[in-house]
Amino acid sequence: MATRNGGAFVLVALCVSGLALRVAGAREPLMPAMYVLGDSTVDVGNNNFLPDCSAECRANYPRYGVDFPTHKPTGRFSNGYNLADQIAQFLGFTESPPAYASLPPERILGQMKTGINFASGGSGLQDQTGKHWRVYTMTDQLEKFTCAVQMMGNSSYDLISRSLVFISVGSNDLFEYVDGNATLSPSRNDTAFLQGLVAAYKSYLQELYAAGARKFSIVSPSMVGCCPSQRFAGAAKKDLDGYRCFGTANDLSRQLYPKLHSMLQDLSADLAGMNYSICHSAAMAETVLKHAASPTLSKPDGAGHGVLRRRRAVRDGKCTKFASVCPNRDNYLFWDGFHPTQAASAEAAFALVADQGLYVHPINLTRLAAL
Ligand SMILES: *[C@@H]1O[C@H](CO)[C@@H](O)[C@H](O)[C@H]1NC(C)=O
Ligand SMILES: *[C@@H]1O[C@H](CO)[C@@H](O)[C@H](O)[C@H]1NC(C)=O
Ligand SMILES: *[C@@H]1O[C@H](CO)[C@@H](O)[C@H](O)[C@H]1NC(C)=O
Ligand SMILES: *[C@@H]1O[C@H](CO)[C@@H](O)[C@H](O)[C@H]1NC(C)=O
Ligand SMILES: *[C@@H]1O[C@H](CO)[C@@H](O)[C@H](O)[C@H]1NC(C)=O
């Protein structure tokens, strides 16, 4: 029954999300600024500026951006707008605030008034995640944020406390931990690993709070084992009603969410005036994937109408300028081997904004913004 309701919700979200977010774009912003931290799900071009980052950790070449308003790649790991853009649009901005690394130093102070995006593809909760590309780690991102807040001086407090801190991170820690490995050591300790991630998250939130942040929107890692790149990894098994996913990786996502949620509950009880909204992305993805897998609703490769397919919209392996892409990209969940399409992130954004307690707890972004 829960799944049926969930499925219906997802369909409704699909139909109205674009409209709801566009209407929102016409208003005065609901919050003065938005600060974005995290990984490739929300990076809008920071990695373009990394010296040691190869094509693998950048998205500044075709066919990324094919559905972006300019039809040009920007560094977003998407065919169009990503989740940060879509949340920004809900708040009343035209798109995500600009990438920190794209700003000349003299523009940082002024840009802090409406927001900056610090996110870096490949980064994780642990500093060692993404290390081989020397990505901007969460520690780096935090340092840049707190430094910019300090530059603003006393005037920052009111602004920062009324603004949104939007964080989407953690999947890369899980990817690197399992590493497509069928023979993960039986003596490994998943509990200790997950506790370490939660402790890192907690320390970042404490730092953000100390810098004046009060309103947090947190996106927990999704079903990482169902990304096209992971689906046929070593330990893949039938997960999600027979849909072949890397079950070990999915189990980590499932276990992480309650730990993150209870950390947030404890933290907000300790830190006066802190409010948060957390999205259970794994549960949401599970619903969408089961729905997409339902033979009565769509054939895996049939001409689905409004049902997001499970494969990627980039047809031949890697997303390069030579890749052919599916014409009906809005019907796909995944753009490349790891990242959602613009349509799938629009759906997630709509849930973050308007969910009534199914996937987003304890309040949705509409309520968080209104506090
Ligand atoms: C800024 O904050 C410091 C420390 O709280 C305080 O001593 C100082 O008077 C403040 N300055 C202004 C202009 O409010
Ligand atoms: C898989 O995990 C085992 C045990 O942790 C390790 O010894 C092995 O090197 C890993 N293999 C790969 C390809 O990462
Ligand atoms: C795994 O780690 C947890 C937390 O650190 C610890 O309580 C538990 O005893 C460990 N389990 C094993 C089998 O070592
Ligand atoms: C906001 O946070 C405060 C504590 O920091 C809490 O008492 C209050 O219930 C929260 N508001 C909502 C709507 O969750
Ligand atoms: C947000 O959450 C509240 C409380 O659960 C709910 O009444 C409302 O319909 C939700 N959606 C929007 C867009 O406010």
Image: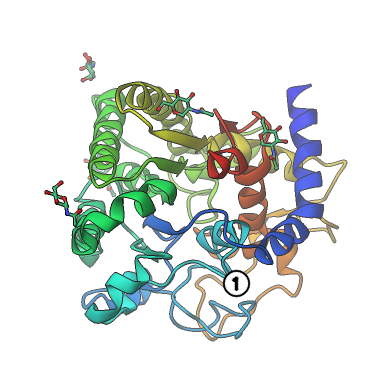
- Give coordinates of residue 352: x percent, y percent: 60, 44
Residue at 83% from the left image edge and 42% from the top image edge: 295
Q: Is residue 341 left or right of residue 317?
A: right
Q: Quadrant of ligand 3?
A: top left
Amino acid on which disc 1 is placed: Gly
Residue at 31% from the left image edge and 48% from the top image edge: 176
Instruction: Depth check: give the residue in front, 48 or 103.
Output: 103
Work out whether residue 236 can be spotted: yes
* Quadrant of the image occupied by residue 188: top left
Residue at 58% from the left image edge and 71% from the top image edge: 94
Instruction: Depth check: give the residue in front, 348 or 115.
Output: 115
Q: Quadrant of the N terminus?
A: top right
Determine whether 61 is above or below 117 in the image.
below
Work out whether residue 307 can be spotted: no
Q: Which residue is mark 1?
A: 80
Residue at 66% from the left image edge and 29% from the top image edge: 358
Determine whether 86 is above or below 70 in the image.
above
Determine whether 211 is above or below 134 in the image.
above
* Quadrant of the image occupied by residue 265: top left
- Give coordinates of residue 49: x percent, y percent: 28, 78
